[in-house]
Amino acid sequence: MGSAVQRRPTGPQPTTHGAPTGSGEHSRPPEPRFLAVGRIVGVHGVRGELKVEILTEDPNRFALLERVFIGPEAEEPTAWPLQGYRLHKGRILLKLTGCDDRNTAETLRGHLVQVPLEEAIPLGEDEYYEHQIIGLGVWTVGGEYLGEIVEIIYTGANDVYVVHGPPPRRREVLVPAIAQVVLEVDLDAGRLTVDMPEELL
């Protein structure tokens, strides 16, 4: 099975993960309350429109929203009523109720645009949110523990999971998220099973 990841949808979440036990159990962080669908990168015009980098696979999901939650990555976001949106040069221009001038809009630069987890668009088969993949323990089909997924690299062709091994060596392994390599994703067990070519190890 492959494992496509919805790109960078996480809001604030814990950064520490439990260590695996010999039985393969893995301590998973709690699910985030919000998922990021954009990041404010600038201001458009003088009426408070926000220029937003798109972090969702479906930009049209903004048409379904009546409000968004905005805040820095490590802080609790604030609810803003969504007045309107439009696509512009590969980005989204957001108009929020109450953000009516350039000075107010500038205070939001760099903040994430988020939605509550319960309002997330359902994923397809073999699709996962980033926060579900980060922190998984990785095991080979032969039972060798390779480490924990700490990062996802988006190459354009396929995602790559960055795995940091246990001490003392703490070697880094790059796992391509393709069907030939990723055999099983078990979120309940916090475990990802791979069939890694020897040259990648």
Image (tube, rainbow, N blue to C red):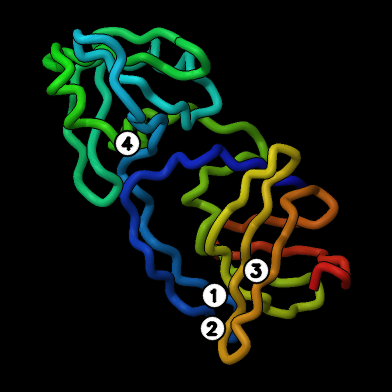
x, y percentage for residue 124? 62, 32
Q: Secondary structure at mark 2?
A: loop
Query: Which tag is nearer the camera, tag 1 or tag 3?
Result: 3
Residue 47: percent from the left, percent from the top? Answer: 19, 8
Farthest residue to the bottom: give it.
Answer: 168
Nearest to viewer (mark 1 / mark 4): 4
Q: Determine contact: label 2, label 1, CB under 8 Å.
A: yes
Residues marked 1 and 3 touching at CB (< 8 Å): no
Q: Secondary structure at mark 1?
A: loop
Residue 145 visible? The answer is: yes
Q: Earlier in the sequence, mark 2 or mark 4?
A: 2
Q: Which mark is residue 21?
A: 2
> Foreground: 21 or 155?
155
The residue pinned by badge 1 equals 25
Please tell me which residue is depicted at 20% across the width and 14% down the height of the picture. 48
Q: Earlier in the sequence, mark 3 or mark 2?
A: 2
Of badges 3 and 2, the one in the foreground is: 3
Using the rendered view, name the quadrant where residue 184 is placed.
bottom right
> Where is residue 39 drawn, in percent x and y?
37, 32
Asked whether, in this view, residue 37 is left or right of residue 123, the answer is: left
Q: Nearer the viewer, residue 143 or 68?
A: 68
Q: Which residue is mark 3?
A: 138
Rounded to the nearest whole Å, what is the CA distance between mark 2 and mark 1?
A: 6 Å
Q: Crowdedness of circle 3 by 10 Å Cα count: few (<14), some, many (20+)?
A: many
**Residue 54, horizontal then vertical, whole percent:** 46, 26
